[in-house]
Amino acid sequence: MATRTRRPQRRNQVLSREQIIEAAIELLDAGGESALTTRALTERLSTGSGAIYYRVGSRDELLDTATETVVTAALAAKPAGVAATPEDEIRTVALALFDAIAEHQWLATRLTLQIVRKPLGPVTVGIFERIGRQVGALGVPQASWFDAASTLVHYILGAVSQNARIDGDTSTVQPDRAEFLEATATAWQGLAPEDYPFMHAVVDQIREHDDRAQFLAGIAIVLDGLTRLG
C-alpha cells in the first residue's frame, strides 16, 4: 500500500506583514538575494504565495520593504551624549549604516539601488534628511548643502561596500579576517619595492587595521573638508 507524502501544515493564524518581512530578512541574511524565493518564503512561513502577495506585494516590493526596514532601524540610532554635536550625529548614523551592512551583506547593493533609482523613496529621503540636517548645522553654506550631503552619503556607501554580498559569489564560508589580512600583506610584501614603494610602506598597517576605525577616520576627513566650504 502506497504511503502518502505529508504536506507541510499550513498556519491557522493570519500572518502579519511584519512576520513576512522578518522571514524575508532571515532568508536574505542566510543566502543573499538568490535565497529569497517565493517557494522558500512560503515553506518557512507555512503559508501560500497569495498571503505574501496580499500583505507585501511582489518579490521586488518585498526586497524594497526589507531594505527600508533595516535602514529605518539604523537611522533611528542616536548619539550617547545628551549634548551631541553635528559631528556626533553624523558619526552615529554613519556607523549605524556601516554595522547594518556588515550584519546584512545583501543590504549594500539594495541600498545603492534605492538611492540611484528611487530618489523619492523612504530610504533615500531618510538618509539624506538625517545627514543633511547636520550638514547645515556644521555651518556649510546652503548653496553647498546637497554637494556636502551627497559626498558623505557616497563615502558611506563606498566604504561599506566591502561588506556586500557579491552576486555570483557562491562561497558560503567567510574567510578568517586575520588570515585574510596576513595573506594580503604577505602578497604585497612580495611585490618589487622599486615598483610599489607605497604598497611596501603600508604592509604593516594592513595587518593591524580596524575597519570601523578606518571608516570613522574617513568620516573625519570628509567632515574636516566640509567645514572649510565657504
Image (cartoon, helix red, strand yellow):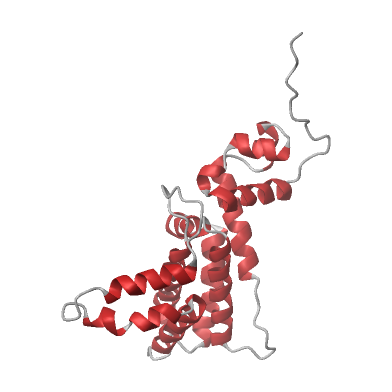
- Res. 53 image quadrant: top right
| Closer-to-camera residue (180/123) | 180
Q: Quadrant of residue 150?
A: bottom left
Q: Is residue 120 visible?
A: no
- Could you say which is closer to the camera, residue 194 or residue 137? 194
Image side of residue 144 versus residue 43, left or right: left
Q: Looking at the picture, how far across and down is residue 152, in whole percent?
A: 44, 75
Above or below 19: residue 177: below
Q: Is residue 29 left or right of residue 227?
A: right
In the picture, which quadrant includes the C terminus? bottom left
Location of the N terminus (image quadrant): top right
Residue 198: x and y in percent read 25, 82
**Rendered position, 83 above or below 95:** below
Which residue is rendered at x = 42% and y = 67% of the image? 180
Instruction: Residue at 39% x, 75% y: name it.
Output: 147
Left or right of 185, for residue 140: right
Residue 220 drawn at (x, y percent): 46, 86
Q: Is residue 108 visible?
A: yes
Which residue occupies 61% across, 60% down? 70
The x, y position of residue 104, in whole percent, is 56, 59
